Amino acid sequence: MKDALYNLSLKYQLSLNFVSVALIMGFFETLKELYFRSTETLWESHVITVLVTATFATCAAYFMRRWALKIDEQLRIAAVAFEGQNGMLVTDARHVILRTNQTFTEITGYDESEVVGRQITEVLNSGNNGVVFGEVMWQDIQRTGSWQGELHNRRKDGEEYPAELAITAVRRNGSITHYVGVLNDITSRKAAEEKVRTLAFYDILTQLPNRSLLIDRINHSMVASDRSSHYCAALFLDLDNFKSLNDTHGHEMGDLLLAEVASRIRKCVREMDTVSRFGGDEFVVILTELAEDKAKSRKEAGVIAEKIRTSLAQPYRLTAHHEKSGVKFTIDHECTSSIGCAVFLDHEASYSDILRWADMAMYEAKDAGGNTIRFHND
């Protein structure tokens, strides 16, 4: 329907152009005939002049209109694309910003008038991007014609956020005349990725590494041990009287105890060590960079294990809500732990062997009455 109306309108305008030009030329020729009565030019020649002139004028008008419509359509498409959901900016060959769109303003907080005339790296840089956003990026654009990557950006109010930037060079006759940049705020995407990573590798209750990440950390500690020739150790912990708390006061109270246990263990180890919730009321601690001597390493691991055992044996004060009535209540609870320790070096055993050794030693501690430490013997 739109095309039909457009064609009808075009035909009408062409006809109008033809008639208008013909009338104008006819009027002109009539005036000329009246003014120059003694002319030798025949009347037919004037008619032919009018027709030929009108035809050429109409053809010219037709093609000019088609060209203008095509240019107008391209400009409208470009305008819609430029004012889209992505932040857009255009710079000259010297990286000076010439124009930005409204989405760019919404992302960065800068109005177009505040950034026009400034270098792109002055506006899109938090200071934490290093050489990647500087020389290397522009070298890639010069070589390949484009660059795409992630960077830390800073809004006008100083807030930092992760951004994705794509820059494309515009060439004319082989020389770069402009650069077009597409900017996106990827804060939400990064948050979603971090959430997925957390669910995949961390325990939701204690925020400690789960079993999957623990295995990866053990393998890393083996590689580090091979490089440094220092022993490592695995501590396997099990709470001695956790089940009675769950059975008596419910799972909410049990979860509070596990969260407090995780917090206490973290305070007993070094920053380089890994504390993991293995499952249920079981925890595993990986101690790295112990001594090069095995006996000394066992002693160092024993000191840390004893520190953990002492901390976990301290009374707990837990506050929760009753499952049915919702009434808040507080209890004092005592919970000790049984700890098994296995010292290892390099790749002398697999991660499953190391965990099995520590688990066996933990059961020896539990068989001894709990609240104690046992070492795995080779």
Image: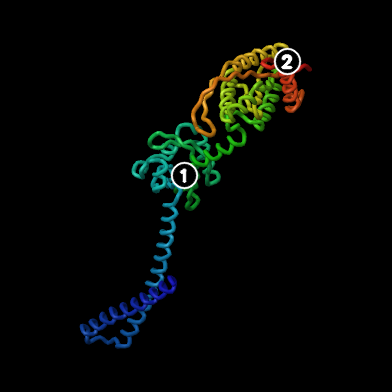
Q: Nearer the viewer, residue 366 or 98?
A: 366
Q: Is residue 323 above or below residue 260?
A: below
Q: Is residue 265 above or below residue 132?
A: above
Quadrant (top left, top right, bottom left, bottom right) of the C terminus: top right
Secondary structure state at the residue bearing disc 1: strand
Q: Position of residue 181 (x, y in %)?
A: 46, 46
- Identified by mark 2, the residue type is Ala
Q: Nearer the viewer, residue 80 or 43?
A: 80
Q: Residue at x 47, y 52 (%)?
A: 172
Picture quadrant of residue 346: top right
Q: Nearer the viewer, residue 196 or 6?
A: 196
How many numbered callouts? 2
Mark 2: give few (<14), some (14-19) or many (20+) Cα within 10 Å: few
Picture quadrant of residue 338: top right
Q: Residue at x 28, y 82 (%)?
A: 26
Q: Position of residue 99 (x, y in %)?
A: 39, 47
What scheme was used to colour the molecule?
Answer: rainbow
Q: Is residue 205 above or below residue 292?
A: below
Q: What residue is pinned by disc 1?
A: 183
Secondary structure state at the residue bearing disc 2: loop
Q: Position of residue 236 (x, y in %)?
A: 68, 22
Q: Residue at x 65, y 29 (%)?
A: 280
Image side of residue 35 versus residue 149, left or right: left
Image side of residue 369 versus residue 318, left or right: right
